[in-house]
Image (tube, grey):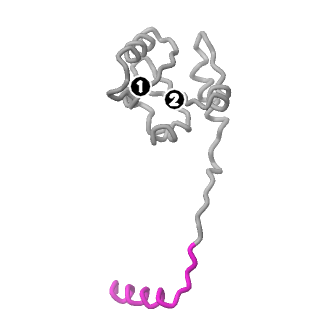
Amino acid sequence: MILEYDIAWAKYMENAKIIPLPLTCWDIFYNYNSEIENYNFIQKEWKTKENFSKIVNLEKREIVITNANQEIVFATNGIYDMNGWNSFEMIGKSPKIFQGKLTSETSRNNIRTAIKNQLPFKEIMVN
Protein backbone atom coordinates (compact mmCIF):
# COMPACT_ATOMS: atom_id res chain seq x y z
CA MET A 1 0.00 0.00 0.00
CA ILE A 2 2.76 2.46 0.95
CA LEU A 3 4.72 1.64 -2.19
CA GLU A 4 1.64 2.31 -4.34
CA TYR A 5 1.11 5.62 -2.60
CA ASP A 6 4.73 6.64 -3.16
CA ILE A 7 4.50 5.76 -6.86
CA ALA A 8 1.24 7.71 -7.25
CA TRP A 9 2.71 10.70 -5.40
CA ALA A 10 5.85 10.69 -7.57
CA LYS A 11 3.71 10.57 -10.73
CA TYR A 12 1.58 13.46 -9.47
CA MET A 13 4.63 15.55 -8.59
CA GLU A 14 6.13 15.07 -12.07
CA ASN A 15 3.20 16.92 -13.62
CA ALA A 16 2.54 19.39 -10.80
CA LYS A 17 3.35 23.00 -11.47
CA ILE A 18 4.29 24.19 -8.02
CA ILE A 19 5.28 27.80 -7.53
CA PRO A 20 7.09 28.44 -4.25
CA LEU A 21 6.04 31.59 -2.40
CA PRO A 22 7.65 33.28 0.58
CA LEU A 23 5.87 32.69 3.86
CA THR A 24 5.06 35.73 5.94
CA CYS A 25 3.72 35.36 9.45
CA TRP A 26 2.57 37.70 12.21
CA ASP A 27 1.88 36.81 15.81
CA ILE A 28 -1.74 37.96 15.92
CA PHE A 29 -2.32 36.33 19.29
CA TYR A 30 0.42 38.18 21.19
CA ASN A 31 -1.15 40.22 23.95
CA TYR A 32 1.12 43.09 24.95
CA ASN A 33 -1.30 44.19 27.68
CA SER A 34 -1.08 40.84 29.48
CA GLU A 35 2.70 41.24 29.69
CA ILE A 36 2.23 44.67 31.30
CA GLU A 37 -0.45 43.29 33.66
CA ASN A 38 1.84 40.44 34.77
CA TYR A 39 4.70 42.87 35.34
CA ASN A 40 2.51 45.28 37.32
CA PHE A 41 1.14 42.42 39.43
CA ILE A 42 4.66 41.32 40.35
CA GLN A 43 5.83 44.82 41.24
CA LYS A 44 2.69 45.55 43.29
CA GLU A 45 4.59 44.88 46.53
CA TRP A 46 7.76 46.73 45.50
CA LYS A 47 8.77 49.90 47.29
CA THR A 48 10.06 51.45 44.06
CA LYS A 49 7.94 51.10 40.91
CA GLU A 50 9.34 50.86 37.38
CA ASN A 51 7.61 52.02 34.20
CA PHE A 52 7.36 48.92 32.01
CA SER A 53 6.70 50.80 28.76
CA LYS A 54 9.62 53.16 29.29
CA ILE A 55 12.06 50.34 29.94
CA VAL A 56 10.97 47.99 27.17
CA ASN A 57 9.87 50.41 24.45
CA LEU A 58 11.97 53.53 24.91
CA GLU A 59 15.17 52.09 26.34
CA LYS A 60 14.94 48.88 24.27
CA ARG A 61 15.82 46.76 27.28
CA GLU A 62 14.45 43.46 28.44
CA ILE A 63 13.27 42.63 31.95
CA VAL A 64 13.91 39.47 33.95
CA ILE A 65 12.45 39.17 37.46
CA THR A 66 13.50 36.52 39.97
CA ASN A 67 12.20 35.52 43.36
CA ALA A 68 14.31 35.17 46.52
CA ASN A 69 15.05 31.54 45.58
CA GLN A 70 16.77 32.79 42.41
CA GLU A 71 14.12 31.38 40.09
CA ILE A 72 12.92 33.43 37.14
CA VAL A 73 9.26 34.38 37.62
CA PHE A 74 8.90 36.86 34.74
CA ALA A 75 10.69 37.74 31.52
CA THR A 76 9.64 40.02 28.70
CA ASN A 77 8.88 38.38 25.38
CA GLY A 78 11.65 40.33 23.67
CA ILE A 79 14.18 38.29 25.63
CA TYR A 80 14.10 35.83 22.72
CA ASP A 81 15.93 38.31 20.50
CA MET A 82 18.62 38.63 23.14
CA ASN A 83 19.32 34.99 23.97
CA GLY A 84 17.09 32.71 21.88
CA TRP A 85 14.93 31.61 24.82
CA ASN A 86 11.18 32.22 24.83
CA SER A 87 10.02 33.96 27.99
CA PHE A 88 7.85 31.00 29.04
CA GLU A 89 10.85 28.65 28.75
CA MET A 90 12.77 30.70 31.32
CA ILE A 91 10.16 30.57 34.10
CA GLY A 92 11.51 28.55 37.03
CA LYS A 93 15.10 28.58 35.75
CA SER A 94 18.03 30.19 37.51
CA PRO A 95 19.22 33.56 36.18
CA LYS A 96 22.70 32.04 36.16
CA ILE A 97 21.89 30.92 32.61
CA PHE A 98 22.90 34.45 31.60
CA GLN A 99 26.29 34.31 33.28
CA GLY A 100 29.25 33.36 31.17
CA LYS A 101 32.98 33.26 31.87
CA LEU A 102 33.28 36.94 30.97
CA THR A 103 30.75 38.12 33.58
CA SER A 104 32.74 39.98 36.21
CA GLU A 105 32.90 38.78 39.79
CA THR A 106 31.78 42.25 40.87
CA SER A 107 28.58 41.88 38.84
CA ARG A 108 27.98 38.42 40.31
CA ASN A 109 28.41 39.76 43.85
CA ASN A 110 26.13 42.74 43.17
CA ILE A 111 23.43 40.40 41.88
CA ARG A 112 23.80 38.00 44.79
CA THR A 113 23.56 40.84 47.32
CA ALA A 114 20.57 42.47 45.62
CA ILE A 115 18.63 39.20 45.46
CA LYS A 116 19.45 38.38 49.08
CA ASN A 117 18.19 41.83 50.15
CA GLN A 118 15.25 41.71 47.71
CA LEU A 119 16.35 44.87 45.91
CA PRO A 120 16.02 45.63 42.21
CA PHE A 121 19.29 45.84 40.29
CA LYS A 122 20.70 46.41 36.83
CA GLU A 123 23.79 44.51 35.73
CA ILE A 124 25.41 43.58 32.46
CA MET A 125 25.84 39.86 31.93
CA VAL A 126 28.21 38.42 29.33
CA ASN A 127 27.46 34.87 28.27
Residues packed near mark 1 inside 10 Å, few (<14), some (14 to 19) or many (20 plus): some
Left or right: 25, with 122 as reference point: right
Task: Estimate the spatial distance between the alpha carbons at disc 2 and disc 1, rounded to whole Å.
Answer: 9 Å
Residue type marked 2: Phe
Residue in view at x 41 percent, y 30 percent: 92
Q: Position of residue 93 (x, y in %)?
A: 39, 31
Residue 81 colored magenta?
A: no
**Local SS, label 1:** loop
Residue 51's place in the image compared with 77, above or below, is above
Picture disc at residue 89: none
Quadrant where the image shows the N terminus: bottom left
Majority secondary structure in the magenta region = helix
Q: Position of residue 61 (x, y in %)?
A: 57, 29
Picture disc at residue 71: 1
Residue in view at x 50 percent, y 16 percent: 121
Residue in view at x 59 percent, y 26 percent: 39
Q: What segment carries the magenta color?
A: 1-20
Picture disc at residue 74: 2
Q: Position of residue 116 (x, y in %)?
A: 41, 11
**Local SS, label 2:** strand
- The residue nearer to you, when weighing 18 against 102, is 102
Residues packed near mark 2 inside 10 Å, few (<14), some (14 to 19) or many (20 plus): many
Residue type marked 1: Glu
Residue 107's place in the image compared with 117, above or below, is below
